[in-house]
Structure formats: structure tokens, C-alpha cells
Image (cartoon, helix red, strand yellow):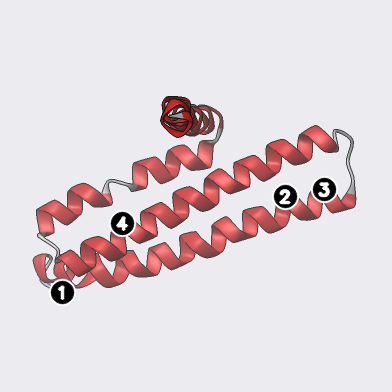
């Protein structure tokens, strides 16, 4: 019986962790200009429906969007934590922020390539190119 008694607490903790995660995303959307830009770039979803992309293309687009959002959220976390532990300028703190921002840039470049490969050919056909 002890196991079943612990499960409601476990379930509550799991549900609460989702709440923390959603608050984190909302907080980042409210404070990070780049993340809002990435949210607008999610218009690719509408374009995907319009162009009727394949399931494989949907998977690639979803992975690209998820990767960019994840990288941006991690970058936001690194920046916040760095500001907390190093309020004054420190070269290593600056390096940590630069590397985290670089990771976002690399993932965004990859997502751009995915977007061009998935959406480019059908758009070029529509435009007669």
C-alpha cells in the first residue's frame, strides 16, 4: 500500500513540473526578443499546411522548430544563471554567454537550411521559377 500512497504525490509533482516548464517558456517569450522572432518564424506551420508538405517534411520542420526553441531557451537559462553568479563583468561569464548564443546561431542556420530544402522547391514552382 505504501507504493500506491506515494503515487498521487508523484503525479502532483509531475503536473507541477509541467507548470514550471510552461511558466519558463512564457517568461522567456516575455523577455527575449529573439525568442519572439522564433515564435513568429513558426508561421512555417501555416505554410506547411498550405503547401501540403509530406509527413517526412513535417517531421523535419517540427524538429527544426523544436531545436531552435530549445537552443533559445537554454541560451536564456545560461544568460540568467550567468547574470546571477557573475553580476560584474567576468571574461568567463562573457564566454559562456557568447558560446550559448553561438549554439542558437548554429541551430538556427540548420533550421534555415531545412526550411529552404522543404519549402523552397514548392514555392519556386508556385512563383514560376
Which residue carries the number 3 mark?
93
The answer to whether the residue labelled 4 contacts the one labelled 1, judged by CB atoms less than 8 Å apart, is no
Q: Nearer the viewer, mark 1 or mark 3?
A: 3
Please tell me whether mark 4 sits on a helix, a strand or a loop. helix
Are the residues at dot 1 and dot 3 in contact (C-beta closer than 8 Å)? no
- Mark sitting on residue 68: none
Dot placed on the residue nearer the N-terminal end, 2 or 1: 2
Which element carries disc 2, helix, strand or loop? helix
Question: How far apart are the alpha carbons under marks 2 and 1?
Answer: 42 Å
Query: Seen in the image, is 42 located left or right of residue 15?
Result: left
Kindly report the distance in space between the C-alpha atoms of the residues bearing marks 4 and 1.
27 Å
Picture residue at 52% right of the left edge, 36% below the top: 33
Looking at the picture, how far across and down is residue 78, in whole percent? Answer: 68, 45
Q: To which residue does mark 1 refer?
A: 129
Q: Please give the residue where the numbered disc 4 appears in the rendered image.
A: 62
- Marks 3,2: beta carbons within 8 A: yes
Between disc 3 and disc 4, whose residue precedes? 4
In three-dimensional space, the C-alpha distance between marks 3 and 2, rounded to whole angstroms, equals: 6 Å
Residue at image mark 2: 97
Of pointers 4 and 2, the one earlier in the residue sequence:
4
From the viewer's perspective, is the residue at label 4 or at label 1 nearer?
Answer: 4
* SS class, disc 1: loop
Question: Which residue occupies 37% across, 54% down?
Answer: 65
Amino acid at each position: 500500500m505504501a507504493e500506491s500512497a506515494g503515487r498521487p504525490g508523484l503525479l502532483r509533482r509531475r503536473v507541477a513540473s509541467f507548470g514550471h516548464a510552461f511558466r519558463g517558456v512564457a517568461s522567456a517569450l516575455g523577455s527575449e526578443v529573439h525568442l519572439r522572432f522564433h515564435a513568429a518564424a513558426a508561421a512555417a506551420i501555416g505554410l506547411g499546411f498550405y503547401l501540403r508538405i509530406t509527413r517526412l517534411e513535417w517531421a523535419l520542420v517540427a524538429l527544426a522548430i523544436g531545436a531552435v526553441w530549445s537552443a533559445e531557451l537554454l541560451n536564456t537559462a545560461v544568460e540568467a544563471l550567468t547574470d546571477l553568479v557573475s553580476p560584474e563583468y567576468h571574461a568567463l561569464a562573457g564566454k559562456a554567454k557568447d558560446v550559448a548564443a553561438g549554439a542558437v546561431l548554429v541551430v538556427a542556420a540548420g533550421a534555415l537550411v531545412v526550411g529552404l530544402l522543404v519549402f523552397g522547391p514548392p514555392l519556386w514552382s508556385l512563383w514560376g521559377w
